[in-house]
Image: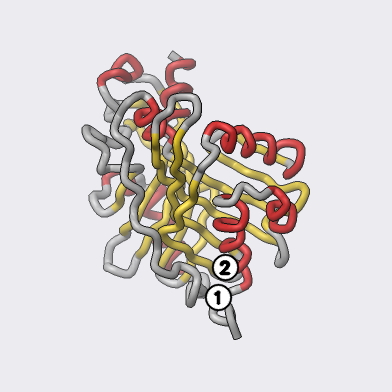
Amino acid sequence: MTGSRIPALGLLLRDYAYAYTASHDFDVCDRLMVKDYVLRMGEFEIRGRDDAYKPATEKQYRQYPGLGFTVHDFMTSGNRAALRFSEHGKSLLTGKDASWRGVSLYRWDGERLTECRVEQDYFSRRRQSEGAASHPVPAPGTDPWTDSLAAESDPVESSVRRWLEHGELFASDDVEFDDESEAGHERARLEGLSVDVLDLFSCGERAAFHIRADGVYAGGLGAEFDSLIGTPGSLYASGYVSTSAGAITGHVVTDRLSYTRRLAAAR
């Protein structure tokens, strides 16, 4: 039977990716999300599908009327799911092409989505809109949906949680932060680091997480932000990682654009 090897939450998020997000079809959105749907991004919470979420999304569609959505990978435990993706399009405000990466984590009630935690690399999108060369869109997953189901693993979750809480993520050479193909890219450095794990779940040997890292900014995001060095603040990140190679490897997206704005306001 068609789709029988794709879990139910996978079918739902396949529609979310292609029938809704890439097609800009809010009728599909109604079918996929509960009315009190919650989107959490960085310090922001958007609650309510019709009154809050749709207007925010429609604003982005107006700026990027041809906005595309490319899925690189997908995981699900049956109860939870995560996507690693890119969005891309031409801005009507600047006339510039851009692509930017994201990692999103989902909850559902067995029928419709109830919550999304996500970070997207709007820092990179801003640089491209200001004249940097548009980044190529990474290759889509060949088939991220079929056979994507794996059971949750307490040992994997414990290992990843320890790794996060000990701050090892920010020192890792096995994890790609944001878009490290960007010329001159360097990840934010924080001193006096402490990490709060906001969300974490596993699917077999893989895991997805959303964290807040508190510390003092020590540079790394370019000379234009050197005046912010020494300023304390919170950096949010979502990640999509694997533990199968004897080390934790994968991809992390941070809210570095909002982070620098928060630091500037605190400064």
The front one of 247 and 14 is 14
The answer to whether 72 is drawn above or below residue 8 in the figure is above
Residue 150: where, in percent of width, then height?
49, 74
Q: Secondary structure at mark 2?
A: helix
What is the quadrant of the N terminus in the image? Answer: bottom right
Q: Give the percent coordinates (x, y) of residue 135.
A: 32, 41
| Number of residue marks | 2
**Label 2 sits on residue:** 10
Residue topped by disc 1: 6
**141 is higher (above) or lower (below) than 178:** below
CA gap, disc 2 to disc 1? 6 Å
Q: Residue at x 43, y 28 (%)?
A: 95
Identify the amino acid type marked 1: Ile
In the displayed structure image, the side of residue 123 where residue 69 appears, left or right: right
The picture quadrant where one finds residue 28 is bottom right
Q: Are marks 2 and 1 in contact (CB under 8 Å)?
A: yes
Numbered circle sitting on residue 144: none
Residue lying furthest bottom? 1
Left or right for 12, reference 129: right
Image: 255 above or below 68: above
Q: Secondary structure at mark 1?
A: loop
Please report the residue visible at 30 percent of the width from the left and 51 percent of the height from the top.
Answer: 175
Q: x, y (%) of residue 172?
A: 27, 49
Residue at figure coordinates x 64%, y 37% from the top left:
58
Q: Residues within 10 Å of mark 1 (few under 14, many from 20)?
A: some
Which residue does the image show at 45% across and 67% down from the upper left? 144
Q: Amino acid at mark 2?
A: Gly
Relative depth, front residue between 212 and 100 = 100
Q: How is the image coloured?
A: secondary structure
> If the image is split into quadrants, where does the C terminus sit?
top left
- Residue 215, can we see it? no
